[in-house]
Image (tube, helix red, strand yellow):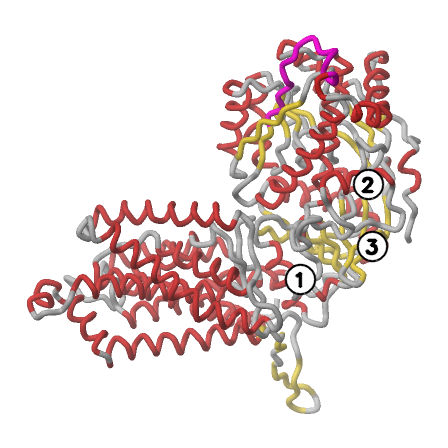
Amino acid sequence: MTKSNSDDTKIVETPPITDTMQPNRRQAIKTLAATTTLAAVASTTPLFGRYGQAQSAEPIKIGFQVHRTGIGAAYGRWYNRTTEAAVKKINDEGGINGREVQIVAEDDGTDPKRGAEVVEKLATQHGCDIAFGTLFSHVVIGSAPRAGELKIPYFVVSEGHHVASGMLNRYTLQPGITDVKSQVQAMAPFVNSTLGKKVTMIYPDFAFGHDHRDYFSAAVEAQGGKVVAKIAIPPTESSFTKYFPKIPRDTEVIYHVMVGPAVLTFVKEMGEFFGNSRPEIFGFIDSLEAVDLASPGLEFLEGTYFWEGNPRYAQANQSDYDKAYRAAVGVDNNGASISDSKDVSTYAHMFGCWETLHIVKAGMEASGYAGADDRAKLIEAVEAMTSIPHSYANPQGAKEFNGKTHQTFGHQYITRVENSKLVLAHTTSIADTYYPDEVDYTTQSF
Amino acid sequence: MELVPYLILGLLEGLVTAAVLSLMALGLSLVFGVMRVVNVAHGEFFMVGAVLAWQIASLFEGHPAWGFLAALLVAPPLTACIAVAANQLVLKRIEYDPERTIVATIGLLYIIQQVTLMTYGPDARPVEAPFNQRLSIPLVEWTERGLSLYWPWGLGTTTYKLAVIMAAVMLLTGIWMLMTRTRFGLLMRATQLDRETAQAFGIPVGRVYAAVFGLGAALAALAGVLIVPIQQAHYLMGHDPLLLSFIVVIIGGLGSLPGTIVAALLIGISDGMISVFFSPTLAKIIATLGVAFVLIFMPQGLFGKRGL
């Protein structure tokens, strides 16, 4: 069952798109690949010399829409740390187009209405070049239309299928993290063949959870399995036992994904409900992001499986890129902060900030981005990207970006709980995550 | 779905909700009954209790029971101090005027919430229960060999949840004793009946008000400490219990102690039952609708006295 992911560095899949912008695309990839080798040279250059070639000495301002408060706060804290680490790396290597990168962070309270206001504030008041970093899908859906109206590129790190579904607009892109539809589609064969055919789904009752419900049910049925019950729970809920009696007795596998401040309570109460007679359990790590797996009450998870966007615990086959990225963000081998072992990271998601910022850098350099007038050129340059190799700039693994749907595709990891740690059990190929295009944003005008 | 196991599960979950709710609603009801103050910030005292419990418990190493015990003893009095300070600094200055106290306590709500956010951050903090053994509940069934026990899937509770129910019963008895058997209870009841006459008889009404506001907050904080090993401490956790407490107090009759307890049981158990059999949202819909009907047909509540 265990499969090596040593093919991370190779690009074997056919790019999902074809277009005519070859030179631009090649340039973008070249920049991306060269970043790592440039690092050593640039970091030794004195500060004043580093931005010397810039046409303008003004810094590039990246507006960071961050969930500092509200139900996404744990993610926000780590998205912030990852973003700061990525910007430090980019600046140490000479910035973007020789210009320093500056982050302008604004809290959106994980609230869609506030989200749209934050995008507006970043664009008009702070004069940011782009907006970036939103995670929660309802905030993305609430903010993206405003970004489109203001014509500011909006790079989200959200996982929701709303980008690739065609629901948003040409200004909204998701190049640094894969979407739920591709993730669950890649998980369904494993769940069906390894764990069981009759699945009960438990998911949060908003856009992100509905993506899980719709695309996982479809994928499981395509595999010959069946979803026997769908249990939706509001993400602000604080007590969960009352939802569990709806799990049918013939359930073979529990599929759980939960978000919000009460995730630990959710998983603990699930353990208390089942006692010694639990079915097989497959969860998205979202249910325990930023939570220590050794917390009391989680012992029943031993032997269950998790999807992880990026494995929290340093694995036996850990790449040098992951090692370097972990150190740069300040995360230890157990996925917790180096300075506080109780401060567990959202490791499965936050790499998306790091990778997105490097894509932005590559796009700005390929398009010769000089200011707000070049925003359309930046989007075209990112749309032209295809294969993105596994590197220090992309430590989670190789990716295939689809310029038409504005969505990236990549490897998915399945880990198993062993001695309260997550051990890699299976790595999917990128091809496992493909589905037919549902939109072509490149046909929309700017 | 089999009926009996889930009926029992719904009842147990409902009793835990009712236990916490009755403590909290009792605090709200006391404050309204004696002081005529609609305390919108009551949910925040619940939250402060839970957050303080987390902070106090995290100071202790070793067995989780010590940290929890310390939290149980320290967090409610600390919260009461905050409430008394708020009473002296705000409510007293506006002379307990009904409209102005509502606005003032709304302000208090935001101040407490934001100070907690700025001090402790936005994360949900767990507190380990002093003991937490899962208990499977057996049922009796008639088989060919006569009566026998069987253990239905998912039917169980934890020792801690049972302890919460017990603790609430004991605390409620204590409050009842305090109200009916002590001098302080007499002063409270006298103030509740007629503030001016009480004052004329030499009762220090100002001090009674401060004590009642502190006691109300301490009850909410106690509920918070009891719930935090089941849920988690979080700066936004006061919102839902506040709404439910208002529902309980309105249905039970403002200022009536037995009414509050009966209404808490009614709301808690029906919430548990409806949640288990239908959906938690439906439970909230029915509870809120219940309030509307009580207000239409029995404006004084189930146990409230007319003209109070």
Residue A150 in the image: x percent, y percent? 55, 17
User: Which of disc 1 and disc 3 is earlier in sequence?
Assistant: 1
Quadrant into which the N terminus of chain B falls: bottom right
User: Is the Cβ of the residue at disc 1 closer than 8 Å to that at disc 2?
Assistant: no
Residue A307 as seen in the image, left or right of residue B3: right
Tell me the element at label 3.
strand
The label number, if any, that marks residue A423 in the structure image: 3
Quadrant into which the C terminus of chain B falls: bottom left
Give the camera-side residue of A273 and B131.
Answer: B131
Question: 10 Å neighbourhood of mark 2: few (<14), some, or many (≥20)?
Answer: many
Please name the residue shown 16% across and 64% down the image: B205
How far is disc 2 from disc 3 in space, using C-alphas?
Answer: 15 Å
Nearer the observer: mark 2 or 3; the answer is: 2
Question: 10 Å neighbourhood of mark 1: few (<14), some, or many (≥20)?
Answer: few
* Rendered image quadrant of residue A8: top right
Give the camera-side residue of B190 and A33.
Answer: A33
Give the chain letter at badge 3: A
Tell me: residue B268, above or below residue B296: below
Q: Is residue A9 visible?
A: yes
How far is disc 3 from disc 1 in space, using C-alphas?
Answer: 17 Å
The amino acid at mark 1 is Ser
Q: Main secondary structure of the magenta part?
A: loop
Tell me: residue B10, above or below residue B85: below
Q: Mark 1 sits on what residue?
A: A295
Q: Mark 2 sits on what residue?
A: A322
Give the chain letter at badge 2: A
Instruction: Say if the magenta span includes residue B211.
Output: no
Please name the residue shown 29% across and 72% down the image: B258
Instruction: Say if the magenta span includes residue A54.
Output: yes
Please provide the residue range marked out in magenta: A49-63
The label number, if any, that marks residue A77 in the structure image: none
